[in-house]
Image: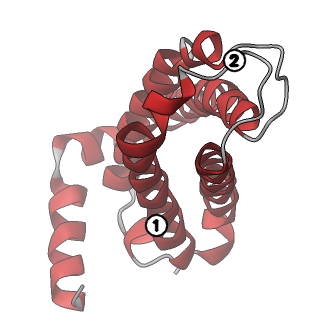
Amino acid sequence: MSPEFLRAIELALRESAVGEFVRESRWAWPILESLHFMGMSALIGTVGLFDLRLLGFARAVPLVAMHRLIPVGIAGFVLNATTGFCFLAGTPDQYLYNLAFKVKVSCILLAGVNILFFYGRVFRRLGALPPDSPPPFGARLVGAVSLSAWIGVMSAGRLLTFFRP
């Protein structure tokens, strides 16, 4: 993206009602951080467990039963996306020009493409597997990519403060 385009996005976010609220409210940032942490816990707690199951751990737990937890992970992701947007609107200059933020967004996009691959190519075959059988290669690949992407998201998120522009 061109510097002019990034600057226009930065100004639009900074002048938005959400951006002003986050910057001017005494409690907005700490509450948003708490919600962001809870969302990440729900996301990684469910999707991470499912990814580990795809990798072959806890074979006694049927994949279908583990998959029922995914809506909790989706809710965690929605909470994180919402609070993350609030952070971005509050201090856009700390994110838009930050290498760690770009890595974080790239990892989120990778996780999204991985989900599309999972539901498009792998998921249907998992229902036919006997409960104790090892997951097929495609499922293990999806689990490894997903787990790696979400670890990347969390790591890059922690590094945001160290790479402030």
Q: In this view, does 50 lie above or below 145?
A: above
Q: Which residue lies under the disc numbered 1?
A: 106
How far from the left and from the top, in percent, is residue 32?
A: 49, 32
N-terminal-most mark, 1 or 2: 1
Q: Do we see residue 23 in this rendering?
A: no
Q: Residue at x 70, y 59 (%)?
A: 155
Quadrant including the N terminus: bottom left
Q: In this view, does 5 lie above or below 145?
A: below
Q: Is residue 130 left or right of residue 114?
A: right
Which secondary structure lies at badge 2?
Answer: loop
Q: Is residue 146 left or right of residue 89?
A: right
Which secondary structure lies at badge 1?
Answer: helix
State the mark number for residue 20.
Answer: none
Q: Which residue is drawn at 83% across and 14% down?
A: 60
Judge depth for marks 1 and 2 and give the one in front.
2
Render colour scheme: secondary structure
State the mark number for residue 130.
Answer: 2
Going by the numbered disc 2, the residue's amino acid type is Pro
Graded by Cα atoms within 10 Å as few (under 14), some (14 to 19) or many (20 or more), the crowding at tag 1 reads: some
Q: Which residue is drawn at 24% across and 78% down?
A: 6
Instruction: Pick the residue in front: 15 or 48.
Output: 48
Instruction: Pick the residue in front: 63 or 31.
Output: 63
Q: In this view, does 117 lie to the left or right of 72?
A: left
Instruction: Pick the residue in front: 23 or 95.
Output: 95
How far from the left and from the top, in percent, is residue 64?
A: 58, 14
How far from the left and from the top, in percent, is residue 90?
A: 36, 51
